[in-house]
Image: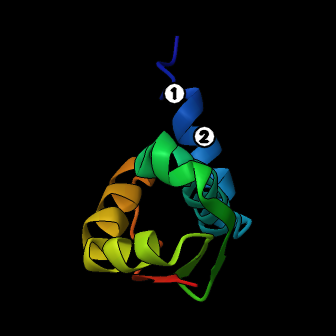
Amino acid sequence: MKKRQTQTLGDVIRRYLRQEGLETPLAEHRAVSLWPEVAGPAIARYTSGVWLKNTTLYVRITRPALRQDLTMGRTLLARRLNERVGSQVITQIIFC
């Protein structure tokens, strides 16, 4: 009998997503959906919109004082989001 090379289902799915060009859009969607979890419930409460365009995450914050505070920690938030997603999809965060 021949011994077949086995692959995990996760590896097969990742390879398929990469071949079809869906890996990056999926990671970007995950980054946007993880914002409330990474930012925390207090910040998520004052977030009215989150979207990603050209590796820049735009976050609409309803409180100007909070927006200013978050601007100081945006590098850390971007790093945390990228770690959770598992790839470098966010290069900067703009609070508006």
The image position of residue 93, as x and y in percent, is: 45, 80
Q: Secondary structure at mark 1?
A: loop
Question: Looking at the rendered structure, which numbered label has been put on residue 91?
Answer: none
Query: Can you tell which quarter of the image residue 87 is in?
Result: bottom left
Q: How is the image coloured?
A: rainbow
Q: Is residue 67 left or right of residue 47?
A: left
Looking at the image, how many numbered discs can be counted on the residues?
2
Q: Residue 17 versus residue 48: which sits nearer the camera? A: 48
Label 2: element kind: helix
Residue occupying the point 56% across, 51% down: 44
Q: Position of residue 45 (x, y in %)?
A: 60, 49
**In percent of the image, x 36 and y 71: which residue is there?**
70
Callout 2 environment at 10 Å: few (<14), some (14 to 19), or many (20+)?
Answer: few
Q: Which residue is mark 1?
A: 8
CB-based contact (under 8 Å), mark 2 and mark 1: yes
Of 72 and 11, nearer the camera is 72
Q: Quadrant of the C terminus?
A: bottom right
> x and y percent of residue 78 in the render?
36, 68
Mark 1 residue type: Thr
Alpha carbon separation for disc pair 2 and 1: 7 Å
Q: Position of residue 46 (x, y in %)?
A: 59, 58
Q: Is residue 71 left or right of residue 34?
A: left
Residue nearest the observer in this picture, 58 or 27: 58
Q: Is residue 64 above or below residue 81?
A: below
Q: Residue at x 69, y 70 (%)?
A: 21
Query: Residue 12, labelled with which disc?
Result: 2
Query: Can you say whether 43 is above or below 54 in the image?
Result: above
Identity, as a three-letter code, of the amino acid under mark 2: Val
**Does 73 sit left or right of 34 as displayed?**
left
Q: Quadrant of residue 25?
A: bottom right
Residue positioned 43% across, 69% down in the render: 66
